[in-house]
Image (tube, rainbow, N blue to C red):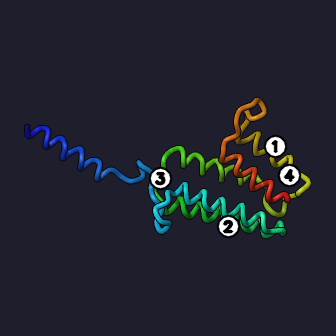
Amino acid sequence: MYTKNIFGVVIAALLFLTPSFIFGQKSKGTGGLSVKQEADLLLSNLKKNLKKETSTEKKFEQINHFKKELTTLRKKSARQLENDEIAMDILVTALDLIPVKNEFKKSECSSYQQKILRDMSPNSDQGEKVDPSTQASMDVLSLLCK
């Protein structure tokens, strides 16, 4: 009789005290969005801004600002669900494959895209679906190349 009550209290206490990062930490100040959702929102805003911008130099500034914001967001937040962490890692790693502003040449965009595919999704040429985070980085690259 008392064992059931004690067991229920212990389970309730464990659920209450379980760190929120196990369930996906909510970001502070964004109306309850998870860090991954906030990262997706930042990425969406980056893409919109890149579509409007014509200067390659300013596009690089926006990409660098995005990477800095994403890094800051991730550092100040608790660890996320494993799939979300992996997706954000893939995105940043793929964006880092784009040459820096001084070395970037629009005429080489197709080789930059092939490098991202080769490094981040090596089996895509064999019909394997490209990871959404890798695709997002390729979308950013294509906007940079316009």
Q: Amino acid at mark 3?
A: Arg
Q: CA distance from mark 4 to mark 1?
A: 9 Å
Residue 139 against residue 41 in the figure, above or below: above
Residue 8 figure quarter: top left
Q: CA distance from mark 2 to mark 3?
A: 22 Å
The residue type indicated by label 1 comes to Gln
Which residue shows up at 8% across the image and 37% down it?
1
Of pointers 1 and 3, the one earlier in the residue sequence:
3
Mark 2 and mark 1 lie on one chain; the one further toward the N terminus is 2
Total marks placed: 4
| Apparent side of residue 86 relative to residue 49 in the rendered image (left or right) | left
Q: Secondary structure at mark 3?
A: loop
Query: Mark 4 — residue?
Result: 109
Q: Which residue is mark 1?
A: 114
Q: Position of residue 28 (x, y in %)?
A: 46, 66
Mark 2, Cα crowd under 10 Å, few <14 / some 14-19 / many 20+, is: few
Horizontal side, residue 13 vs residue 78: left or right: left
Q: Residue furthest left?
A: 1
Label 3: few (<14), some or many (≥20) within 10 Å? some
Circle nearer the N terminus (4, 2): 2
Residue that protrudes farthest toward the right in the picture: 107
Mark 4 or mark 3, earlier in chain: 3
Which residue is denoted by mark 3 in the rendering?
A: 79
Q: Residue at x 75, y 52 (%)?
A: 139
Q: CA distance from mark 1 to mark 3?
A: 31 Å
Q: Identity of the amino acid at label 4? A: Cys
Question: Where's residue 56, x and y in %?
Answer: 83, 66
From the viewer's side, name the closer residue of 122 and 99: 122
Label of residue 65 in the image: 2
Amino acid type at circle 2 is: His
Q: Position of residue 26 (x, y in %)?
A: 45, 58
Q: Confirm or deny contact between disc 4 and disc 1 (CB under 8 A).
A: no
